[in-house]
Image (cartoon, helix red, strand yellow):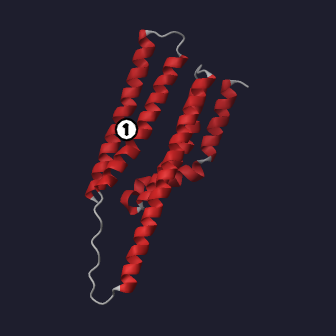
């Protein structure tokens, strides 16, 4: 089967996934209006559904099969890791909520409400969750560019490096902004 046919199939798969990734994008856009675990799950969904789009673009290039497999595997592993983190965060949120309700049911007679716990590790976790997927994608794309080059030339090395630096810089900027916003709330 030709690369073009597979690219068309991957594009159709990406387009069909809009019923999942558009609400996920809206949930991320809503920001603090949604629970933190919901936003992490939305990032996982977006990563999962954008992987076929990236593979479709790479299928239009003369990329070798191992490079395409590496890109697809990196996207799927990143999505799975984000989903696992969102499940753990959801369990924490449910535990905190059950503690709040039990406090309300027990001590309604003048007992002060407990102060919300300060968790400085949350900002660090947010920073890592936004930084790591970008750096993984940057590494995979740089590797793909280097593997697909006919021969290792100066131009292919510069292209791989500049692509990786650009994606890593964007990931760093987004991670810093989100961690700062998490620290304020």
Q: At 29% from the left edge and 53% from the top edge, which residue is drawn?
A: 181
Q: Residue furthest right?
A: 1
Q: Position of residue 66 (x, y in %)?
A: 60, 24
Q: Position of residue 75 (x, y in %)?
A: 53, 38
Q: At 34% from the left edge and 54% from the top edge, which residue is drawn?
A: 122
Mark 1 lies on residue: 171
Q: At 69% from the left edge and 29% from the top edge, which residue is drawn?
A: 5
Callout 1: SS: helix
Quarter holding residue 2:
top right
Quadrant the N terminus occupies: top right
Q: Residue furthest bottom?
A: 109
Q: At 60% from the left edge and 42% from the top edge, which residue is drawn?
A: 14
Quadrant the C terminus occupies: bottom left
Above or below: residue 125 compared with residue 167:
below
- Visible residue check, residue 121: yes
Q: Position of residue 39 (x, y in %)?
A: 44, 55
Label 1: how many residues lie within 10 Å, few (<14), some (14-19) or many (20+)?
A: many
User: In this figure, what is the number of numbered marks?
Assistant: 1
112 vs 71, nearest the viewer: 112
Q: Position of residue 24 (x, y in %)?
A: 50, 53
158 vs 83, nearest the viewer: 83
Residue 142 placement, left or right of 67 = left
Quarter holding residue 166:
top left
- Visible residue check, residue 60: no
Above or below: residue 78 compared with residue 117:
above
Above or below: residue 89 compared with residue 14:
below
Residue 21 placement, left or right of 108 = right
């Amino acid at each position: 089967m030709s690369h073009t046919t597979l690219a068309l199939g991957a594009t159709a798969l990406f387009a069909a996934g809009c019923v999942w990734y558009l609400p996920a994008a809206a949930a991320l856009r809503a920001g603090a209006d949604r629970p933190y675990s919901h936003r992490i799950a939305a990032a996982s969904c977006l990563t999962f559904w954008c992987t076929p789009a990236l593979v479709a673009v790479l299928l239009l290039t003369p990329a070798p099969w191992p490079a395409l497999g590496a890109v697809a595997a990196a996207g799927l592993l990143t999505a799975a890791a984000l989903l696992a983190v969102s499940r753990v965060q959801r369990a924490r949120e449910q535990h905190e909520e059950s503690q709040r309700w039990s406090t309300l049911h027990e001590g309604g007679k003048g007992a002060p409400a407990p102060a919300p716990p300060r968790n400085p590790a949350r900002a660090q976790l947010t920073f890592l969750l936004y930084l790591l997927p970008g750096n993984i994608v940057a590494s995979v794309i740089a590797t793909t560019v280097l593997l697909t080059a006919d021969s290792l030339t100066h131009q292919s090395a510069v292209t791989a490096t500049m692509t990786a630096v650009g994606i890593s810089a964007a990931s760093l900027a987004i991670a810093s902004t989100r961690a700062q916003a998490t620290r304020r709330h």
